[in-house]
Image: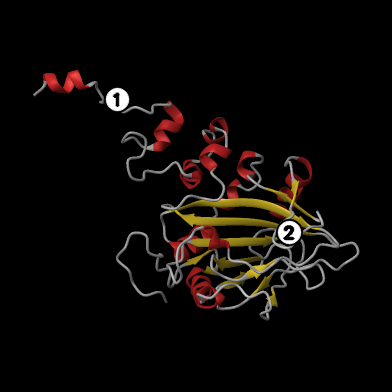
Amino acid sequence: MQQKNTSPYAPVDQTHVLIDGLDIGRVVAQIHEQGYTVVEQFISGDMIESIRNAFDTEVPITEMRFLGSTTGNTWRAHNLLAKTRAVDGLLLDARLRAIVEGVIGQYCQINITTLFNTLPGEYQQDLHQDDGLWPIPRPHPSFLCNLLIAMDDFTIENGATHVVPHSHRWTKPVDQTIESIQVEMKSGSAVFWEGGLWHGGGANTTADQERMGLFMSHLVSYLRPSDLHLVSVPRDIARELPKRLQRLLGYYPFGNGVDGLDPLNTLHDGLVVHPDAQLAEHWRSRR
């Protein structure tokens, strides 16, 4: 169990919290302890097919050529919330929300939403740390919580994700020669990990098996996300989303907000100047 912390940004204590039969406290404790955990059958077959259909018919995709991959045999679809409504309900799932808050706290936002498909012939990714994008010296508090859902079965042969247990606590640079393990799991299962965990996609050595996955990342509210949803999700789309999802996109009060206004109000009414704001002459006349 995490040590109690009075900071409003501290991870939420989820001890003894059960949601839809899932022991949230146990899941969170495993993530804090070993850096990752697997939750079997996290989403239903119907949801898998809905998301798969979106990837095949709705969502523009690109090739991924980084982290050791030069083949073009991984397809990715970033910025999902601008392209499809197939994952909205999942992002609001009570189990997901509770796990994320147990790892990085209740004041959080969506960092990345990505569908990817690892095709036969793809190389193994370099091991890396997702929280390395932010230049914050280690050790540091957990500020990134990630989720990868297997749309297809993840096997050794088709490139199941490599992880290095407990590496989220290490301060040394990532070592590509270190021994890792691969997370095999059935379609619909999910692996959660803390942002500092050393990990990387595996090589797909099969002749004919695709490995599709849905990646979702959450970040604490006070850091800039990798995907800037306030810009990348058009406002006409954002206005139609549930309020909780709008908040997760970044329309939440923080600091001065929008001239002292709630950014969520600005999303709807377009006001970027506080209605009480007046020119200097007005304020001088009141002295």
As drawn, 62 above or below 176:
above
Residue 51 visible to the viewer: yes
Q: Nearer the viewer, residue 65 or 219?
A: 65
**Foreground disc of the pair 1, 2:** 1
- Which amino acid does the dot numbered 2 rest on? Met
- Which amino acid does the dot numbered 1 rest on? Pro
Residue 263, by quadrant, is top left
Residue 58, by quadrant, is top right
* Disc 1 target residue: 275
Question: How much space separates mark 1 and mark 2, taking CA atoms?
Answer: 49 Å
Going from N to C along the chain, the mark reached first, 1 or 2, is 2
Q: Residue furthest right?
A: 207
Spot occupied by residue 43 in the image (x, y as percentages of width and height): 65, 59
Spot occupied by residue 154 in the image (x, y as percentages of width and height): 75, 67
Q: Nearer the viewer, residue 255 or 1?
A: 255
Can you tell which mark lies on residue 67? none
Q: Quadrant of the N terminus?
A: bottom left
Spot occupied by residue 182 in the image (x, y as percentages of width and height): 71, 75
Q: Residue furthest bottom?
A: 179
* Disc 2 target residue: 151
Residue 202 falls left or right of residue 25: right
Circle 2 crowding by C-alpha within 10 Å: few under 14, some 14–19, many from 20 = many
Spot occupied by residue 2 in the image (x, y as percentages of width and height): 40, 74
Q: Quadrant of the C terminus?
A: top left
As drawn, 164 above or below 41:
below
Element on which disc 2 rests: loop
Element on which disc 1 rests: loop
Q: Nearer the viewer, residue 79 or 92?
A: 79
